Image (cartoon, helix red, strand yellow):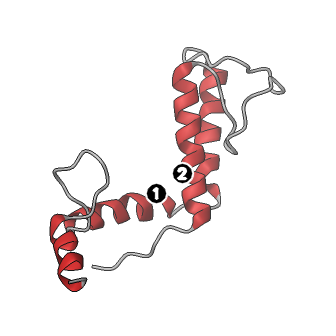
Amino acid sequence: MKLAKASPEEVSALLNLMRVLNTAESGIPCKPDGTWEDGEDGIDWFDPDDPEHLRKFYDRVTACFADHPGGLLRTIGGYHLSMENNVFDPDADTYEWHPSLVAAVEARNR
């Protein structure tokens, strides 16, 4: 199976999404471009029980996908395919080349 790689812009949009999600969880909101909130819209602390804050959060999350709607699919799909195709070691806790690839490179270099 082939899947188009995520573009640098799509990866950037997903990193911004990660920032929005992480900062909302901590209570300190972040804009979709990854910059910290300055209170210009009256929200300088995220309250998950406030409908206005929830709407702003929704707007910020969807803004991360507005210009790059396929980025999430390509990024997560790329990870999934790399694991399914034995690019990375599924038993490692970090990204490490699959043992069969390491062995192939070592054999080639002998």
Disc 2 packing (10 Å; few <14; some 14–19; many ≥20): many
Instruction: Locate residue 60, reporting x and y percent.
Output: 64, 39
Q: Nearer the viewer, residue 79 or 41?
A: 79
Judge whether 20 appears above or below 5 on screen.
above
Q: Are marks 2 and 1 in contact (CB under 8 Å)?
A: yes
Give the residue at x 61% y 32%. Answer: 57
**Residue 104 in the image, given as x and y percentages of width and height:** 18, 78
* Sequence order check, earlier mark of 2 and 1: 2
The residue that disc 1 covers is: 72
Number of numbered markers: 2
Quadrant of residue 51 in the image? top right
Q: Quadrant of residue 12?
A: bottom right
C-alpha separation, residue under disc 2 versus residue under disc 1:
7 Å
Where is 49 relative to 2, above or below? Answer: above
**Vertical placement of residue 50 versus 93, above or below:** above
Question: Residue beneath label 2, please?
Answer: 14
User: Circle 1 sits in a helix, a strand or a loop, which is it?
Assistant: helix
Percent position of residue 4, x then y = 44, 76
Disc 2 residue type (three-letter):
Leu
Q: Nearer the viewer, residue 40 or 54?
A: 40
Q: Give the secondary structure at mark 2.
A: helix
In this rendering, position of residue 40 left or right of residue 11:
right
**Placement of the N terminus among the 4 image quadrants:** bottom left
Which residue is found at the position 59% from the left and 36% from the top?
20
Q: Residue at x 63, y 22 (%)?
A: 28
Left or right: 31 with respect to 6? right
Q: Nearer the viewer, residue 81 or 47?
A: 81
Q: Amino acid under label 1?
A: Leu
Mark 1 residue crowding within 10 angstroms, few (<14) / some (14–19) / many (20+): some
Residue 7 percent location from the top left of the image? 55, 68
